[in-house]
Image (cartoon, rainbow, N blue to C red):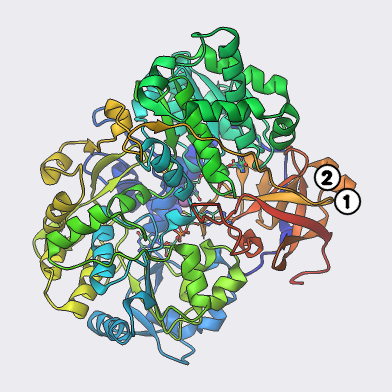
């Protein structure tokens, strides 16, 4: 990881209001700088519009067709589209000029800022520079390395969540046709914990809430472990709509995030000038990893109040009809000690009782969450406890109620629906095999962490990535980078140059693809692709710009090209690439809920996928009921003098894509190597704001160090700290993962601060 100068950082007090005039000005400025006026206008006017392209940034849903404004995007959506549609190019001259080693010395921001990739590039064994290669030669080379493997399980096929449904469906088909379920994806690091907990307790691995449940129906919206002002900015408009009809919002977060506090809607004139809407009614400054204790505490209170006044607090009819496990779970809450709850959550009993008051006053409750919940050792237990919380009052399967994990990448949920998962169930594999006439492998494959372990141990020959930035996004950077270099061949389908192209296997290929903003022309004419948002709406996305280079191919055509090079015409690869309707017909036959896919996705705004708990209170769990669970508190033990570090996104990045070095809402300017710490914790260690410190993580297998961060005194609970992803990934031990989901614990890393020994220590 390349270091940026931390002494250039400027720090102001954090802001309490999100969006408004500054955001509008910044998005226009950025669009014009990257794309020019005409191109910029074309991009922004088709962003999230019916007939236009789906925002490539986050997975927040669009309002229904007919209810969209002319500017149906946020500052960060505009940034993502501008970043992709830039006029800058990385061509063969660029690769001839810079060696891989020279490029490795550049920061993540610099690498992507060079512009769009333009043609396939090949790095031969021992070569210092990437050189051009034809598409046919690239496919042939990749196919020959794959067929040379003694077993298909020596390949891994990684997917990042921007891939369309069509590309993802083909990609999993390719892996399974080859004979492996090694399909790690970014979701393994993201909402895997949500999927695991929800599948077990309610029988679907995704949320059950629609957008209008938030805007029109919920009485209480609980937002935990999520920073919507930065990561799902248009969610603030939905929350504002909810507030205006009288809904309450409770937020729990160790950081007082600007977007959670107040919001100025840039799409309404009043929002540009006024003080904005106060969003959160009750802010709970929960300790990092304290949410399980917090929800268990509320659930305990609800049961106690029910005991005092039977029939008034919990929904006994719902529980008796639809659930099991209630008595056992209630025993667990009865046995809980308040001292344990208070210590683990960092909240007082009074605060938790007051939260419970909000809950009993609300007829319908939604809980939204994201990475602040999923990336902990006990993440799955925490989400099971959130489900308990909802089940207690029948808050599922009726308007304005339910669990709502807010997904990250724009199509990460759709990719899973399409079969991008190392553990797809047998029914899916049966249907896939029947549709295409082959026997898919049944043995579960590697997820992201297991892929890294396999690489490290010399068990992966070929690594193929459909998007993403594997070595930068994954934990334990030093270990992962070393692991990647043990592969024979690494292949990246990408729009922009990134670190994963520079930390490579013995040989490497970069295969440049079209982005969301660009026209996709194939043999049968212009194509669109489809995506699924966080609320299970499936809709079209159609790019409008001329492709960044005539030598780009669509993701679909790249995967199909590789399929053809490997297997000839056996499954109709060419026909699928020529006309995406052919792929959609296969999807219709394999994936439930896609009946009449082509017709239904033609309706403006698309269609919603069935979800049993939402539609009919049907729960396809092991017992056919929604399941209460009993979850032990198991709070993290933090040794004396140590802190729990969480890693967050700044307002100026999309995951490993670093647009700029500012984090406006948190008051940071010009640098990313900062660590946010409670002032009293700094003082206790003889440190002060602006001191330079090393972050040292401690784990059973030893210590890891990230050198030279500027300490920022910040209002976060005692014992907690925060730094940016991906700079802090070097501190996350590979083996430190969530129980059941195996998600890296990027939000709970035990560290200590040491006065910096010098730059690049
Ligand atoms: N602009 C932009 N948009 C994005 C992304 C991006 O990088 N940039 N990334 C996309 C992706 S892939 C994803 S997954 C989402 C991520 O969306 P978020 O989950 O909002 O992203 P993070 O920055 O990881 O923020 C985690 C939040 O949880 C809080 N938190 C940390 N630990 C805890 C805890 O123990 N308890 C509680 N209650 N809160 C905690 C943090 O303070 C922070 O507010 O955003 C998506 N959208
Ligand atoms: N410490 C820490 N680590 C984390 C997290 C954290 O909160 N803390 N969050 C985790 C989460 S939630 C996630 S989702 C992962 C993200 O992990 P990834 O999905 O692997 O990473 P991204 O940074 O989103 O990928 C960016 C790259 O995608 C490529 N790209 C962009 N658009 C396209 C496209 O349209 N097609 C193709 N083929 N390529 C494209 C570009 O080359 C760009 O460099 O990181 C995880 N890592
Ligand atoms: S909220 Fe997300 S999907 Fe919507 S415009 Fe903003 S970044 Fe794009
Ligand atoms: Mo994510």
Q: Quadrant of residue 92?
A: bottom left
Residue farthest toward the right in the current orientation of the protein: 686
Q: Position of residue 575 (x, y in %)?
A: 10, 66
Q: Is residue 391 left or right of residue 634?
A: left
Mark 1 surroundings within 10 Å by alpha-carbon count, few (fewer than 14), some (14 through 19), many (20 or more):
some
Q: Position of residue 10 (x, y in %)?
A: 72, 50
Please count the marks in the image: 2
Q: Position of residue 149 (x, y in %)?
A: 33, 84
Q: Is residue 563 left or right of residue 233?
A: left
Q: Which mark is residue 685?
A: 1
Q: Nearer the viewer, residue 718 or 280?
A: 718
Q: Quadrant of ligand 3?
A: top left
Query: In the picture shown, does residue 684 fall above or below 579?
Result: above
Residue at the image point whose x is 59% and y is 54% from the top = 745
Q: Nearer the viewer, residue 726 or 625?
A: 625
The answer as to whether callout 2 falls within 8 Å of ligand 1 is no
Q: Quadrant of the N terminus?
A: bottom right
Q: Is residue 266 left or right of residue 297?
A: left
Marks 2 & 1, CB-CB < 8 Å contact? yes
Q: Secondary structure at mark 2?
A: helix
Tell me, yes or no, if residue 222 can be seen here: no
Q: Position of residue 542 (x, y in %)?
A: 23, 50
User: Which residue in the protein does label 2 denote?
Assistant: 681
Q: Quadrant of the C terminus?
A: bottom right
Tell me, yes or no, if residue 316 can be seen here: yes
Residue at the image point whose x is 61% and y is 72% from the top = 478
Q: Quadrant of residue 604?
A: top left
How far, Cα to Cα, is label 2 from label 1? 7 Å
Q: Secondary structure at mark 1?
A: loop
Q: Nearer the viewer, residue 466 or 105?
A: 466
Residue at the image point whose x is 29% and y is 35% from the top = 611
Q: Quadrant of residue 44?
A: top left
């Amino acid at each position: 990881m390349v270091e940026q100068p931390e002494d250039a950082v400027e720090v102001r007090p954090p802001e309490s209001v999100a969006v408004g005039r500054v955001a509008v000005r910044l998005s226009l400025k950025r669009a014009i700088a990257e794309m020019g006026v005409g191109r910029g206008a074309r991009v922004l006017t088709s962003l999230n519009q019916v007939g236009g392209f789906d925002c490539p940034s986050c997975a927040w849903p669009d309002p229904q067709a007919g209810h969209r404004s002319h500017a149906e995007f946020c500052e960060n959506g505009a940034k993502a589209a501008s970043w992709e549609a830039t006029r800058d190019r990385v061509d063969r001259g660029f690769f001839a000029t810079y060696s891989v080693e020279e490029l490795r010395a550049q920061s993540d921001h610099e690498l992507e800022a060079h512009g769009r990739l333009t043609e396939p590039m090949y790095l031969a064994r021992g070569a210092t520079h990437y050189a051009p290669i034809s598409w046919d030669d690239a496919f042939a080379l990749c196919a020959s390395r794959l067929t040379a493997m003694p077993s298909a399980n020596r390949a891994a096929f990684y997917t990042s969540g921007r891939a369309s449904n069509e590309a993802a469906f083909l990609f999993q088909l390719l892996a399974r046709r080859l004979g492996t379920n090694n399909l790690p994806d970014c979701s393994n690091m993201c909402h895997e914990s949500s999927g695991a907990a929800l599948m077990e307790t309610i029988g679907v691995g995704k949320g059950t809430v629609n957008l209008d449940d938030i805007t029109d129906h919920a009485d209480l919206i609980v937002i935990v472990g999520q920073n919507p002002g930065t990561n799902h900015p248009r969610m603030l408009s939905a929350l504002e709509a909810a507030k205006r009809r009288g809904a309450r919002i409770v937020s729990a977060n160790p950081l007082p995030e600007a977007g959670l506090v107040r919001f100025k809607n840039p799409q309404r004139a009043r929002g540009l000038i006024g003080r904005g809407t106060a969003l959160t009614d009750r802010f709970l400054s929960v300790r990092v990893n304290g949410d399980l204790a917090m929800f268990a505490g509320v659930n305990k209170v609800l049961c106690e109040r029910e005991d005092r006044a039977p029939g008034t607090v919990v929904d006994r009819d719902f529980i008796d009809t639809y659930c099991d496990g209630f008595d056992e779970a209630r025993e667990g809450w009865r046995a809980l000690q308040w001292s344990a709850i208070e210590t683990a959550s960092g909240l007082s009993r009074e605060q938790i009782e007051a939260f419970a008051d909000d809950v009993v006053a609300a007829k319908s409750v939604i809980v939204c969450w994201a990475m602040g919940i999923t990336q902990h050792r006990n993440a799955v237990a925490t989400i099971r406890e959130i489900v308990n919380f909802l089940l207690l009052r029948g808050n599922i399967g009726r308007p304005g109620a339910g669990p709502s994990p807010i997904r990250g990448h724009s199509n990460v949920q759709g990719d899973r629906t399409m079969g991008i998962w190392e553990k797809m169930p047998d029914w899916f594999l049966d249907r896939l095999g029947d549709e295409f006439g082959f026997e898919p492998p049944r043995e579960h494959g590697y997820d992201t962490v297991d892929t890294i372990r396999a690489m490290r141990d010399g068990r992966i020959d070929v690594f193929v990535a459909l998007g993403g930035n594997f070595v930068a996004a994954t934990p334990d950077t030093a270990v992962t980078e070393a692991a990647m270099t043990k592969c024979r061949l690494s292949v990246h389908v990408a729009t922009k140059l990134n670190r994963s192209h520079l930390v490579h296997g013995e040989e490497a290929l970069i295969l440049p693809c079209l982005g969301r903003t660009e026209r996709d022309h194939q043999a049968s004419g212009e194509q669109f692709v489809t995506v699924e948002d966080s609320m299970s709406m499936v809709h079209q996305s159609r790019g409008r710009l001329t492709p960044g280079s005539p030598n780009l191919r669509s993701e679909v055509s790249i995967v199909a090209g590789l399929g053809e090079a490997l297997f000839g015409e056996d499954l109709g690869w060419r026909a699928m690439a020529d006309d995406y309707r052919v792929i959609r017909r296969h999807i219709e036959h394999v994936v439930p809920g896609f009946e009449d896919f082509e017709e239904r996705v033609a309706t403006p705004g698309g269609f919603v996928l069935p979800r049993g708990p939402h539609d009919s209170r049907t729960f396809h769990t092991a017992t056919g009921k929604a399941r209460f669970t009993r979850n032990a508190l198991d709070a993290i033990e933090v040794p004396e003098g140590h802190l729990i570090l969480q890693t967050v996104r700044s307002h100026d990045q999309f995951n490993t894509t670093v647009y700029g070095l500012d984090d406006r809402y948190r008051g940071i300017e010009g640098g990313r190597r900062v660590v946010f710490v409670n002032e009293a914790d700094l003082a206790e260690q003889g440190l002060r704001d602006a001191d330079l410190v090393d972050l040292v993580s401690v784990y059973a297998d030893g210590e890891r160090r990230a050198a030279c961060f500027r300490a920022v005194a910040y209002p976060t609970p005692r014992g907690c700290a925060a730094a940016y992803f991906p700079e802090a990934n070097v501190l996350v031990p590979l083996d430190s993962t969530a129980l059941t989901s195996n998600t890296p614990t990027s939000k709970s890393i035990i560290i200590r601060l040491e006065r910096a020994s010098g730059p690049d220590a």
